[in-house]
Image: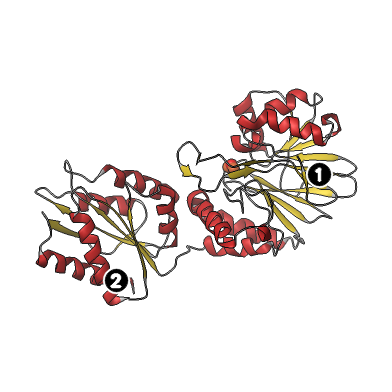
């Protein structure tokens, strides 16, 4: 069933309460998600985006109960990733032949690459408009937010920005709007989404937001393609994005570690004591990379001014979970964060040196050569960890 947002605009998407993973296994989903699609009825009728492929038949069936498909004049595809374009084949099978699909030039390439169809593609650029009768759609290319094909679409008159993934959250709600849901949950999911998906593109986020603000367009609603719609003070999320895109950090240190026989974990706890002796107000989070959710770890790294990476040495290297989480962190291109490594060992002890390389490769400023403890830490080794924590905390100020 569609849900009316305004006289002209109806939400025709899919709320997915059962989703647990996204992007394969790369992104954990805690509170469901949605694939938002919007139908605009003016003198002409336009459909913005579709839904993920497993729901294609359900989507088309519901859409047909909302409107005779032959009455849809235009399709707008803001982004071709499968979660938004996945129902296109099923939809186009039932649409009149030749129904135009408006998207960027890169969008044409993505659609052809995905579905191998000779549809009626109409490539658009920033500033191009599509007259619906009373109101117009204005297209704004947004390359690398987060794919080369991405664009935003603005509806004049209703003053709605259809931002696709931008400003979205993996957050299911049947109530649709930001003022109808738990604010802490909403902001946690919006932050997790930004940290895990948009961080590498922060320079483009800042540039694109400033470009759009420069148009001085009134914005009554921001309608992303995932999660809730921002209607109460909609630009609050735009202001938040400008903060998140600006090498965001809080007064937090995150310790990511893995441990074979608890010695590295014990080291971490004495390091925390040292940190707190220097800065009692700093938030410290201790997260086991083999046990905690990887995307929650990333979100904590995003919030941190510095991280510590700890691992036992095994087979002349570090534990496997450290390699996995650091590969994710490397890809996200965090900027302006500091780091150091630590770990226990029995004989060869290469993990710390190798983790230093991982940290530098991931763009962190290495504050020292790291700290090692041989075998199970005794009282002197515990004190050495406290001292290491103090030195690390001092080096951050
Ligand atoms: Fe929600 Fe980039 O797709």
Residue at mark 2 to residue at mark 1: CA–CA distance = 55 Å
Q: Position of residue 293 (x, y in %)?
A: 40, 48
Q: How is the image coloured?
A: secondary structure
Residue 344 relative to residue 307: left or right: left
**Label 2 residue SS:** helix
Crowd around label 1: few <14 · some 14–19 · many ≥20 (10 Å): many
Instruction: Residue 279: give x, y in percent of width and height.
Output: 32, 76
Q: Position of residue 395 (x, y in %)?
A: 29, 71
Is residue 257 visible in the rendered image? The answer is yes
Earlier-in-chain disc, 2 versus 1: 1
Q: Quadrant of residue 264?
A: bottom left
Question: Which residue lies under the disc numbered 1?
Answer: 40
Residue 121 visible to the viewer: no
Residue shown at the point (68%, 23%) measured from the top left: 117
Residue 57: image tag: none
Q: Residue at x 22, y 66 (%)?
A: 270
Quarter of the figure with residue 43: top right
Rendered position, 90 above or below 62 = above
Indicate the quadrant of ligand 1 in the picture. top right
Q: Secondary structure at mark 1?
A: strand
Q: Nearer the viewer, residue 196 or 124?
A: 196
Labels 2 & 1 near each other (Cβ < 8 A):
no
- Residue 9 location (% of width, % of height): 80, 47
In terms of image quadrants, where is residue 17?
top right
Residue at screen point 12% across, 56% down: 376
Judge from the rendering whether residue 16 lies leftward or rightward of residue 256; answer left or right: right
Of the 4 image quadrants, the one containing the N terminus is top right
State the quadrant of the C terminus: bottom left
Q: Which residue is mark 2?
A: 393
Answer few, some or many: residues within 10 Å of disc 2's Cα (few below 14, many 20 plus, some between 14 and 19).
Answer: many
């Amino acid at each position: 069933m569609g849900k009316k947002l305004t006289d002209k605009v109806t939400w025709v998407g899919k709320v997915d309460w059962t989703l647990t993973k996204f992007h394969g296994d790369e992104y954990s989903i805690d509170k469901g998600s949605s694939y938002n699609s919007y139908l605009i009825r003016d003198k002409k009728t336009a459909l913005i985006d579709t839904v993920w492929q497993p729901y294609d038949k359900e989507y088309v069936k519901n859409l047909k109960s909302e409107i005779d498909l032959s009455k849809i004049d235009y399709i707008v595809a803001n982004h071709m990733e499968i979660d938004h374009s996945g129902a296109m084949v099923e939809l186009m099978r039932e649409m009149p032949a030749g129904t135009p699909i408006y998207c960027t030039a890169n969008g044409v390439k993505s659609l052809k690459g995905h579905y191998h169809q000779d549809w009626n593609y109409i490539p658009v650029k920033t500033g191009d408009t599509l007259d619906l009768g009373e109101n117009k759609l204005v297209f704004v290319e947004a390359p690398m937010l987060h794919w080369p094909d991405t664009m935003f679409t603005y509806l004049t008159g209703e003053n709605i920005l259809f931002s696709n993934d931008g400003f979205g959250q993996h957050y299911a709600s049947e109530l649709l709007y930001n003022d109808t849901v738990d604010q802490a949950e909403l902001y946690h999911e919006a932050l997790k989404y930004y940290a895990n998906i948009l961080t590498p593109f922060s320079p483009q986020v800042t540039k694109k937001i400033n470009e759009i603000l420069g148009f001085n367009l009134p914005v009554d609603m921001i309608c992303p393609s995932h999660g809730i719609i921002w209607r109460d003070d909609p630009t609050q999320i735009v202001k938040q994005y400008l903060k998140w895109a600006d090498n965001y950090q809080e007064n937090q240190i995150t310790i990511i570690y893995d441990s074979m026989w608890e010695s590295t974990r014990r080291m971490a706890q004495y390091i925390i004591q040292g940190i707190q002796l220097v800065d009692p107000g700093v938030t410290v989070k201790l997260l086991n990379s083999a046990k905690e959710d990887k995307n929650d770890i990333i979100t904590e790294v995003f919030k941190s001014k510095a991280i510590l990476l700890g691992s036992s040495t095994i087979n002349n290297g570090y534990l496997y979970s450290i390699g996995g989480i650091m590969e994710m962190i490397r890809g996200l291109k965090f900027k302006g964060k500091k780091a150091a490594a630590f770990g226990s060992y029995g004989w060869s002890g290469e993990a710390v040196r190798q983790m230093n390389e991982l940290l530098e490769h991931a763009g962190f400023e290495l504050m020292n050569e790291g700290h090692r403890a041989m075998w199970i830490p005794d009282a002197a080794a515990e004190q050495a960890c406290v001292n290491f924590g103090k030195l690390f905390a001092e080096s951050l100020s």
